[in-house]
Amino acid sequence: MSKVVLITGGSSGIGKSIGELLLEKGYIVYGTSRNPQNYPNSRFPILALDLTQKDTIKSCIEILFEKENRLDVLINNAGKGITGPIEEISEVEIKRNFETNLFGPINTIKFVLPHMRKQNSGLIINITSIAGYMGLPYRGIYSASKGALELITEAFRMEIKDFNIQMTNVAPGDFATNIAAGRYHAPVLENSLYKIPYGNTLTLMNEHVNGGSNPTIMANAILKIIQTNKPKIHYKVGGFLEKISIVLKRILPDRVYEKMLLKFYKL
């Protein structure tokens, strides 16, 4: 029996690449989008889902089970970037980012778990970010929301271990997607004390995304995890410097690591 996979945010970028690869490998794939009508040419069905609206999450899961009567793999891929000096980002935008990157995935898991318990099987993959392992300048809110999902994954795994449901976390580095265009940018204010350093860092971040790896690398990593009997707790998918940065954070003194980041971002 072909496994049924639901990918939140499966209409573009990493989610689309994952969906298309899994489709080629014989999986039954569904993606989600806030506006599925915008993707009439998708190679797999796109269901309506807005991570900030619990009723749409509930409706999406109900529709999926009406169609397939099971869900083998949930991939919490949808997320939103946010940049800016923390002092200048509005509370509304901070809460909106956490609604999308943290509370949305948690609610999706909550709606899926009863069904997976009933079928006595399931795999949940939470896609976070290597940025979630460290507080990055002018990406602090994004780092915090993705880092929180990392810890939620660790706790959830232990809580659901008796239900034959597995959960893992995959942290990608920079990939060539449209995330830079879709993320919220706090404006570079003319009279801001952060104008020059934030402006320069924003340019550097966009360059990293534009020069990022092909999303098919991430898709192949996800396929391998799905085909693994006992997935690890954490996976990192990215370039050598991105992955080694996590190791260095563990072994270097805090101030040394901070100086390394400041030098990298030219601050």
Image (cartoon, rainbow, N blue to C red):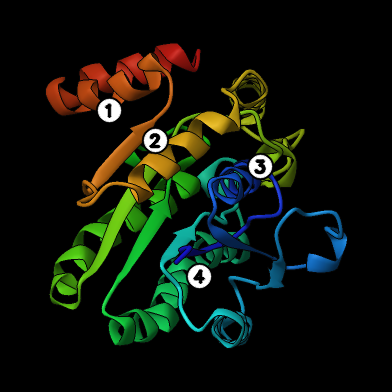
Mark closest to the chain's N terminus, 1 or 2: 2
Q: In this view, does 235 lie above or below 152?
A: above
Residue beneath label 3, please?
Answer: 13
Question: Where, by quadrant of the figure, is residue 212 drawn?
Answer: top right
Q: Which residue is drawn at 16% across and 20% down?
A: 252
Q: Few, some or many C-alpha atoms within 10 Å of disc 2 (few <14, some 14-19, many ≥20)?
A: many
Badge 1 crowding class, 10 Å Cα cut-off, few under 14, some 14 to 19, many 20 or more, is some
Q: Name which residue type carries label 4.
A: Gly
Residue 130 is tagged as 2
Residue 215: x and y in percent read 58, 32
Mark 3 is surrounded, within 10 Å at the Cα level, by few (under 14), some (14 to 19) or many (20 or more) other residues, namely some
* Mark 4–mark 3 distance (CA, rounded to whole Å): 19 Å
Q: Can residue 5 be seen at all in this image of the molecule?
A: yes
Tell me whether the residue at label 4 lies in contact with that at label 3, contact meaning CB atoms closer than 8 angstroms: no
Task: Confirm or deny contact between disc 2 and disc 3 (CB under 8 A).
Answer: no
First in sequence: mark 2 vs mark 4? 4
The type of residue carrying mark 3 is: Gly
In this figure, which residue is indicated by the disc labeled 1? 246
**Label 2 near label 1: C-beta < 8 Å?**
yes
Q: Name the residue under label 4.
A: 104
Q: Where is residue 62 in the image (x, y as percent from the top left)?
A: 57, 87
User: If the image is split into quadrants, where does the N terminus sit?
Assistant: bottom left
Secondary structure beneath label 1: helix
Disc 2 element: helix
Q: Which of marks 4 and 3 is in front?
A: 3
Give the number of the mark in front: 1 or 3: 3
**Quadrant in the rendering for residue 145:** bottom left
Answer left or right for 104 relative to 169.
right
